[in-house]
Image (cartoon, grey):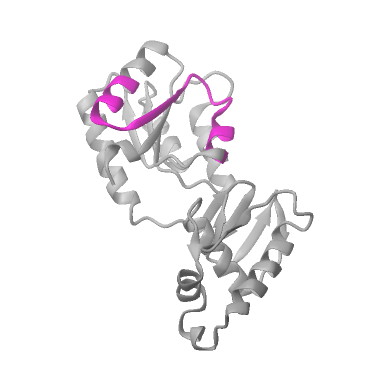
Amino acid sequence: MQNQDIEIVVIEDEEDILELLEYHLSKTGYSVTGFLSTEHVERFLEEENPALMVVDRNLPGVEGSEFVAYLRDEGYDIPVIFLTAMDQEKDLEEGFTSGGDDYMTKPFKPKELLLRIEALLRRSGVRKSDRVKYRDMVLDTKQHLLTIEGNPVELTNLEFRLLYTFVKNPHQPLDRDFLRDEVWGDDSASFHDKTINVAMNRLKKKIDPSGEKEYIVPVWGVGYKLV
C-alpha cells in the first residue's frame, strides 16, 4: 500500500501544531484529515476508514484519552498515537490504559513521529481486534456476537461469517466464488447458486428488517457489496 492510500486523522487544538503535522504527513505522502476537537470525529469515522489517529490529550470538551477509551468501547480498533504535553508517568499510563498504542510528548521531532507512525502501521497490519465496527454494527469475532445500535442481533455461525466477510471488504463487490470460498470453505461441495441467495436474504432480513439501512446491496452480474 502506498502512503497516499493511507489516511491519518490528527486531533490537535493548537492550529499551528495541527498545520505542522498536516504539512509533514502530507509531504510524506499520507492523506491527512485534521480536527481541532473531537466534536465531529466519530461521524467522520462512521463514513471513512482511516489507518491511524494522532491525538492530543489537552482537547476542548472531551479529553483525548477519554475520547479514545470511548472509541474502544464502541468497537473502533484504529491505532492511536498520543502526542501531548502531558509527560508525567501517570499520564503515560493513562494513555496506554485508555487504548493508546504509542505515546509521544511535546516538544517533538517530526521525523521521530513519522518513524513511529510507520512502525505502528506495520504492526497494525497484522494486529487483529476481537471487536470490529462498521456503521452502527459491532461484531465481536471472539464470541460471534453482533450488536446494531447496541442491540444484540442473533445470527447463525454461517450468517456471522458471511457478514464478517463483507465487513473485512467494505465497498468492494464480492462475487459468488469468493463468498463461497470465504464463508462455506470445506462445505462448498454442497454449494448451489441458490445457497448464496437464501443466505443473503436471511442475513439482510436480520440486520435490516425494514430495509431502510441497505447495508448490503446487489451488484448486477457480480454479487454483493457492503455500502
159 w.r.t. 191: above or below: above
In terms of depth relative to the viewer, which is nearer, 57 or 118?
118
Measured as percent of width and height from the top left, residue 90 is found at 41, 32
Residue at 64% across, 47% down = 136
38 w.r.t. 18: above or below: below
Outermost residue to the top: 16
Residue at 64% across, 72% down = 197
Quarter of the image holding residue 194? bottom right
Quarter of the image holding residue 153? bottom right
182 w.r.t. 224: above or below: below
In terms of depth relative to the viewer, which is nearer, 120 or 165?
165
Residue at 39% across, 39% down = 52
Outermost residue to the front: 221
User: Can residue 143 be seen here?
Assistant: no
Measured as percent of width and height from the top left, residue 129 is found at 46, 56
Numbered range of the magenta stretch: 22-46
Task: Confirm whether the magenta stretch covers residue 44.
Answer: yes
Outermost residue to the bottom: 190
User: Can residue 110 be seen here?
Assistant: yes
In terms of depth relative to the viewer, which is nearer, 208 or 142?
208
Measured as percent of width and height from the top left, residue 201 is found at 69, 68
Task: Confirm whether the magenta stretch covers residue 96.
Answer: no
Outermost residue to the right: 210
Residue at 38% across, 18% down = 18
Q: Specify whether 106 is left or right of 141.
A: left
Quarter of the image holding residue 87? top left
Measured as percent of width and height from the top left, residue 24 is found at 27, 23
Q: Specify whether 12 is left or right of 142.
A: left
Q: How many marks?
A: 0
